[in-house]
Each structure stands twice: as C-alpha cells, then as structure tokens.
Amino acid sequence: MNPILGLIIFIVVTIIASLMRSFYLIKFVYGKRIAIYKLANSYGCYIGPTIYVISVFFIALGPLSFKIFNLNFIQYYSLNTIAGIGYGLLYPPFAPVTNSGEIFVVKRGEKLFAYVGKFMGRKFEVISMPSKEIATMIAKRLTNRCEFEVTVDDSNNRD
C-alpha cells in the first residue's frame, strides 16, 4: 500500500468534487441572482471549530486511515476517494470568508440568501441589503451575524 498514491487520490478527488460543487452553484444558483456586489471587507464571520472538525475527520478517514485501521490497498484507496468527495463538498460552505470576491444575492421564496464567493459559495441569510448611502450588507448563518462591506454598483443589480 502506497500512502503517497492514497494522498494523491484524495487531493485529485477533492479538487474534482469542489469543481463539481462550483459548477452546480454557477448553473443553478448564480443564474437566479437578483444582485451582485464586490466584497470589500467582512466582520463577524467567525466559523468556529467546524472547519477543523471537518478537516481532521476527512484527513483521518482518507490519507491517515492506513495508520488507524487495518486496511488492504483497495479499502485504503476507496476510503481516500470517499474522503475526497466528502471534503470537497463539505469544506467550501464552512471555509472562512476572505475579504475579496463577490457576493451573489438570490431570492428563494420570501427570503434572500447571499452566496459569498463563486467557488466556495458560503451561504448566508440576508438581514439587510446595502444601499447607495449604506454600503453594508448584514447577513447571518445559524447564529453568527456577519457584516459585509460592499461596493454598490446598480448596473449589476436587478430587482
């Protein structure tokens, strides 16, 4: 059993799963946007220990599984594939918000949702939209309240 090959499988499958998630967001979510803003800065978007729990779990399930469990090479490579898919799909929504990129606002039912970043697509429920006077969007995820400073350009927004 080659741990380097298992790690390569994990990385390649993670990238493929992340790209598949990104293509899904671009096709089915961002096509229904009602507004788009450039993110200048963000405040209060601490994600807590979730990102570390996800990372440790999938690293243990994939690349380190040969040290934790008694596996043959097919089981090891299969676990790396499963871990890569899980990590590629679960890491992006919980990734930290960087102070660059775009915010896409989508309406679903009566609620507005903001997706931060085209690739990561972190989802927040919109509490208040920015205006020309106040260029701050307030959103929440679970119990965390975030403020996004944005650049307001009405040419990109449609109601």
Image (cartoon, rainbow, N blue to C red):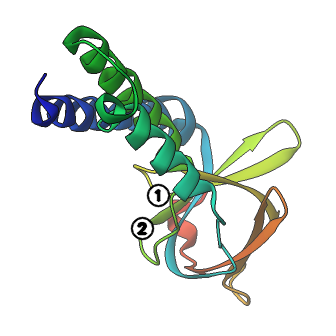
Vertical placement of 135 versus 121: above or below? Answer: below
In this rendering, position of residue 16 left or right of residue 61:
left
In this rendering, position of residue 52 left or right of residue 62:
right
Tell which residue pokes out farthest to the front in this image.
70
Vertical placement of 121 versus 102: above or below? Answer: above
**Front one among 112 and 48:** 48
- Label 2 sits on residue: 101
**Front one among 140 and 36:** 140
Vertical placement of 57 versus 121: above or below? Answer: above
Mark before the other along the chain sequence, 2 or 1: 2
Q: Residue at x 85, y 62 (%)?
A: 143
Tell which residue pokes out farthest to the bottom in this image.
133
- Label 1 sits on residue: 117
**Front one among 122 and 110:** 122
In this rendering, position of residue 139 left or right of residue 78:
right
Vertical placement of 29 versus 38: above or below? Answer: above
* Badge 2 vs badge 1, beta-carbon distance below 8 Å: yes
In this rendering, position of residue 50 left or right of residue 89:
right
Amino acid at dot 1: Gly
**Front one among 42 and 76:** 76
Amino acid at dot 2: Gly
User: Can you give x and y, in whole percent of width and height, for residue 21 in the image?
Assistant: 43, 33
Q: Residue at x 38, y 42 (%)?
A: 59
